[in-house]
Amino acid sequence: GGGGRPRHRSRSAPFATRQVAAGDGLTADNLIARIKVGAITLGVLVLLCTIGGFVANIAAVVAMRRARAFAPLALRIHIEDAAGTLVPLSAVLAAQSVRKPVASGARVASTKFEVRRLITGRPVDAALGVIAFCNVPEEEVWAGMSEGVAAIEREFERLGTDDDRKCLRYVLHGQTGDLAHHKWPNGVMDEGRPPGLALADFCDDASAQLAGLRPPHVAALRLYTSAAFRSINGHLREQEKSDESGGQNQPVYPFPVTLSFIADGLRRLRAVAATRKDANEAIDVWRGMRNVESDADFYAKGGTELAPMSGTTSLTVAVQYALGHAQGDTAHALLFKIVARQERERWSSALGAGPYPQFTTVHTR
């Protein structure tokens, strides 16, 4: 029995020795070193994550600024309402675009929703002036301008529409308040003005006197800011379509004398703009166009406006025009922002004598 116990110890001794040898490698110093390495690794990972988050935040800020810079105009602009509160343009667009109810049984022509392409002219057309674009001998236009108001009346009596002639008779022979019962798409003519003002009263306006405007200038400018602008502008755009086809059989513009008085009157009105305190300050001029869209060629090259171009300092008014005054026939709205940097690039409204005094109109060059 006594001999068996030593043999048992001798067989287990090698195993015990190996355990001690293996355990000898896990010293306190080695354990501390491993902990330090793990802590350093973890710290590096935390630092990398922090740097990555910082870079991501910077990238997000840059992306937001770029998105804001290139975002659609409606998402970046606010309009001040009557209460002085800034309202996002997108909200104004939504409110203005609410369609008017259509009477039971009424039919809406499908052509109303047709979106037209923005038509612009060539720089050479602007350089040559309006008379050359009218395809009318200059001598005839000068002779007509020497006749004054009579030549304007003859042009529209001969080739104008019924609405054109109605507006012309009001401008030449009527008084403010005569058409108070007639509401045009953009309002009542001369609404808010004292009744009884005739053409002579607008000619006596201080701005008209300063600009040296004669009765045919004032009459042409007032006529253009009435519903007759559709005929004046529409035929000018027809001139450009003919020119695009090669200039063959280009039509004769029907209102060359009226158009010449408008152009000359606007140039003279720079005298009024030059006397303003903000004559050398930049202002933003807005223009809204309904059911018109621009194309890639316009964005790449720009273009020349073919007709007298009215704008407004009120973005709300421009939006109303772009949406067709909520008539319910707007499929596409185009909004222009024009920065007029000095008085030579902007001309005041027709002496504030336009038929719609509630709208502040600016004509740009």
Image (cartoon, grey):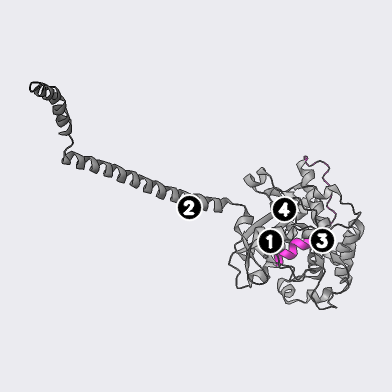
Q: How many marks?
A: 4
What number is the disc on residue 150?
none
Task: Between residue 222 and residue 25, name the one nearer to us.
Answer: 25
Magenta-colored span: 245-268
Is residue 262 found inside the magenta-colored segment of the image? yes
What number is the disc on residue 92?
1
Of badges 4 and 3, nearer the viewer stands: 4
Q: Residues at badges 4 and 1 in contact (C-beta under 8 Å)?
A: no
Q: Where residue 224 sits in the image (x, y, percent)?
A: 80, 62
User: Is 226 displayed left or right of 42 in the figure?
Assistant: right
User: Is 251 displayed left or right of 345 in the figure?
Assistant: right
130 in relation to 8, above or below:
below
Q: Where residue 141 sits in the image (x, y, percent)?
A: 82, 58
Label 1: how many Cα within 10 Å (few below 14, some 14–19, many 20+):
some
What number is the disc on residue 333?
4
Image quarter where the C terminus lies is bottom right
Label 3: how many Cα within 10 Å (few below 14, some 14–19, many 20+):
many
Of the numbered discs 1 and 3, the one sitting upstream in the chain is 1
355 in relation to 29, above or below:
below
Secondary structure beneath dot 1 equals: helix
The residues bearing labels 4 and 2 have C-alpha atoms spaced at a distance of: 31 Å
Q: Where residue 266 sits in the image (x, y, percent)?
A: 72, 64
The residues bearing labels 1 and 2 have C-alpha atoms spaced at a distance of: 28 Å
Of the numbered discs 1 and 2, the one sitting upstream in the chain is 2
Q: Amino acid at mark 4?
A: Ala
Is residue 284 found inside the magenta-colored segment of the image? no
Q: Would you identify the image quadrant in which residue 144 lies?
A: bottom right
Label 4: how many Cα within 10 Å (few below 14, some 14–19, many 20+):
some
Residue holding disc 2:
61
Of the numbered discs 2 and 3, the one sitting upstream in the chain is 2
Residue holding disc 3:
258
Q: Residues at badges 4 and 2 in contact (C-beta under 8 Å)?
A: no
